[in-house]
Image (tube, rainbow, N blue to C red):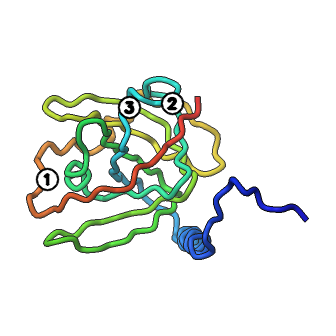
Amino acid sequence: MTRPDPDRPVVPSELLQAIAALDSALEKQPPLEEPLVLWRVWNRDVQDFPDGPLEPGDTIEDAGFCDCTLHQGHAMSVAGRGTALVRLLLPPGVRVMPLWYTGGEAAQGLVFLARGTRLRVEAVDEVGGWDFPVVTALVLLPGDPLPEPVGDIALSLPPRDEIPPPAQITRVVWGPDEPRLLR
């Protein structure tokens, strides 16, 4: 019998049960039938990745659950200098778990993606007047090989919303993520 590594923290069983419950709930969701655009914020500057600046064609894996929102305005209320607003393009077949809740007077559509979600960066745009870049990333289906990049993927997207978020949307700060760049 091997003894546990004394330098490795012990993960509480309640946390392991919660992770297993979220994994199970995501597996039970029906796959998307239509493409979907979600938004999130990375608490990391796109110029500050360990292997260099984030560029189109890079693949990223998010080891944790990927929390997103349906509302660009909500994500923009969280983004700021040193972060990145991320527009996620979800193809049919991706499983998502919606978690609707109300914060203040605004309904916020929170959506989870599974642990280990892979993304391929399609564009990194600087938008005039915004303190943060906009990263457009395609969510890759689990187990699928990396598809060839499509140069005009942004043409199929809804136009960017440049209207500032409504005042009633409260600022929500999500815990920092550590997306891993796979080059």
Q: What is the distance, in whole Å, between disc 2 and disc 3 at their CAs? A: 12 Å
Judge by depth and name the residue closer to the eye, 128 or 152.
128
For residue 53, which quarter of the picture? Answer: top left
> Can you tell which of label 2 and label 3 is closer to the viewer?
3
Q: Which circle's residue, 1 or 3, is located before the other in the chain?
A: 3
Q: What residue type is disc 3 on?
A: Val
Farthest top residue? 52
Residue 124: where, in percent of width, then height?
A: 35, 30
> What element does badge 3 sit on?
loop
Residue at the spot 62% in from the left edge and 66% down from the top edge: 11
Residue 96: where, in percent of width, then height?
A: 47, 63
Label 3 sits on residue? 46
Q: What residue type is disc 1 on?
A: Pro
> What element does badge 2 sit on?
loop
> Can you tell which of label 1 and label 3 is closer to the viewer?
3
Residue 146: where, in percent of width, then height?
A: 60, 37
Residue 165 tag number:
1
> What element does badge 1 sit on?
loop
Residue at the spot 13% in from the left edge and 53% down from the top edge: 165
Q: What is the distance, in whole Å, between disc 1 and disc 3 at their CAs? A: 23 Å
Q: What residue type is disc 2 on?
A: Asp
Judge by depth and name the residue closer to the eye, 2 or 23.
2
Residue 138 tag number:
none
- Label 2 neighbour load within 10 Å: few <14, some 14-19, many 20+: some
State left or right for residue 86 relative to residue 150.
left
Q: What is the distance, in whole Å, between disc 1 and disc 2 at their CAs? A: 30 Å
For residue 136, which quarter of the picture? Answer: top left
Label 2 sits on residue? 58
Q: Which circle's residue, 1 or 2, is located before the other in the chain?
A: 2
Judge by depth and name the residue closer to the eye, 15 or 131.
15
